[in-house]
Amino acid sequence: MAIEPETKSWTWVLEKRCEACGLDAARIDFRDIPDLIMANAAQWPGALDLGDPRLRPDDSTWSPLEYAAHVRDVFRRFVARVDLLVTEDDPVFENWDQDATAVTDRYNEQDPNTVLRELLLNATVLAETFRSVPGHALGRSGRRSDGSVFTVETLGQYFIHDPVHHLFDVTGQRFAASTS
């Protein structure tokens, strides 16, 4: 059964704390993002081991495996977005229909071990990508096709909410760290 596509903009997470997952993205220090990525990635094996990873909790919610595959792909996609911001002037990010990707790539039919291996690899690459951004590049900007503008710093803050929130979606555990 197909899940209704997500249509709301989550850019509001740059303005206020997410009451659901507990992350206050605007308070995240950019230099903490690589460690947060790796901490998040390290929790996904346990999240997929809570039961059948392909089992959807209801007809309108992804399974843990679908969330993990999505997070894996988000990690990969944001490597490209950070690289664009650092290397090009005012880039426009390529549109990505995450819901269509979930269906086309059959997220729920993928091998959980492969998804986890790729998630960890993509997390490692993305953490290093964020870690390598020079301080003078944090204010470089780019935009989505909907007109939302991000600097390297705000893109990182916006990004980190996604895997944190999806881990909450699967485990119910709210974000708790000294950086929040």
Image (cartoon, grey):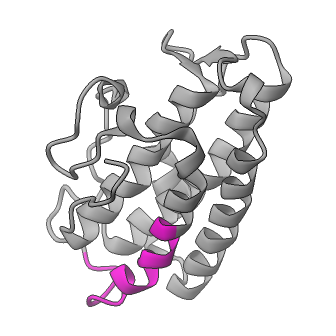
- Magenta span covers which residues? 39-55
Residue for point 60% across, 55% down: 34
In the image: residue 61, left or right of residue 90: left
Up/down of 50 relative to 29, above or below: below
Seen from the viewer's position, the closer of residues 179 and 162 is 179
**Among the 4 quarters of the image, the one containing residue 166:** bottom left
**Residue 119 picture location, percent across and down:** 59, 69
In the image: residue 87, left or right of residue 9: right
On whether residue 15 falls in the magenta region, the answer is no
In the image: residue 84, left or right of residue 12: right
**Among the 4 quarters of the image, the one containing residue 118:** bottom right
On whether residue 48 falls in the magenta region, the answer is yes
**Residue 122 picture location, percent across and down:** 67, 63
Residue for point 50% across, 83% down: 112
Seen from the viewer's position, the closer of residues 106 and 16 is 16
Split into 4 quadrants, where in the image is the N terminus? Answer: bottom left
Residue for point 65% across, 16% down: 142
